[in-house]
Amino acid sequence: NVYGTGPRIQKLVPEVTVLDGCIYIVGFVSGTGEITQMGKIFRLVYGAHHGTVVKPGLLEAIQQDLQEAGIKVDLSPDINRDTFIKWSFISAMAVTGAYYDVPMGEVQKPGKIRDTFIGLSTESAALGKKLGVEFPEDPVSYNLKVIDKLDPESTASMQKDLARGHDSEIQGLLFDMIAAAEEQGIDIPTYRMFAEKFKESNH
């Protein structure tokens, strides 16, 4: 869920070929050793970063294995773009849900909460454009399209973890977004406003 994970891992293990990717799925721990999927969204996107040398046919072989297992999978020609798109979506979803302490059904309704999600998506889209990400469609419209397909009772894992007092992805989904925007000179007032509430949760 955090942008740039693949390249960071690659630096730690230079002798290994590291691919990058992201999964669109909503689930929760429903019992010991048991995970339950919520809704119908289950899609995997993966690929190699520019400059990564991959054995011919390997990416396609992985795709075939996943498809034969019944998984919807896309082999990305621009995994940097696609992991940013996922980060942008999950960040807006998790921060909105955690801030208001609501499931995604509340984000699907017109009003203040949905407007917050739109504001966060707009700010991360501005960052993406500054980083050179070429979005295949309007990123805000895309995020809304995905959020509207989710089970209304679903929540982000970060939101669940914060509610339980567990370690969460808040550093990667909120504070790293702010840090990246500051590095690029992008103003993201909605993110900064929400960060004030969560600073104590992270420190």
Image (cartoon, rainbow, N blue to C red):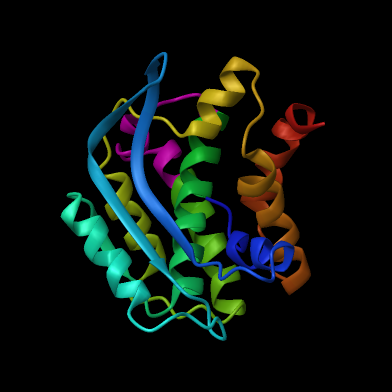
The residue lying toward the viewer, choosing from 81 and 22, is: 22
Residue shown at 71% from the left, 63% from the top: 180
Residue 98: x, y in percent? 54, 30
The residue lying toward the viewer, choosing from 44 and 40, is: 44
Residue 112 highlighted magenta (yes or no): yes
**Image quadrant in which you'd find residue 22:** bottom left
Residue shown at 41% from the left, 30% from the top: 155
Residue 202 versus residue 4 in the image, above or below: above
**Image quadrant in which you'd find residue 12:** bottom right
Residue shown at 65% from the left, 39% from the top: 170
Does residue 61 appear left or right of residue 47 in this picture? left
The residue lying toward the viewer, choosing from 202 and 83, is: 83
Residue 104 versus residue 179 in the image, above or below: above
Residue 115: x, y in percent? 44, 46
Q: Is residue 55 visible?
A: yes
Q: Which residues are magenta?
A: 100-115
Does residue 145 appear left or right of residue 159 in this picture? left
The C terminus, quarter of image? top right
Residue 74 highlighted magenta (yes or no): no
Total numbered labels placed on residues in the image: 0
Residue shown at 55% from the left, 61% from the top: 124
Q: Is residue 137 visible?
A: no
Residue 183 versus residue 42 in the image, above or below: below
Residue 160 versus residue 149 in the image, above or below: above
Does residue 25 appear left or right of residue 32 in this picture? left
Residue 95: x, y in percent? 55, 39
Residue 161: x, y in percent? 57, 25
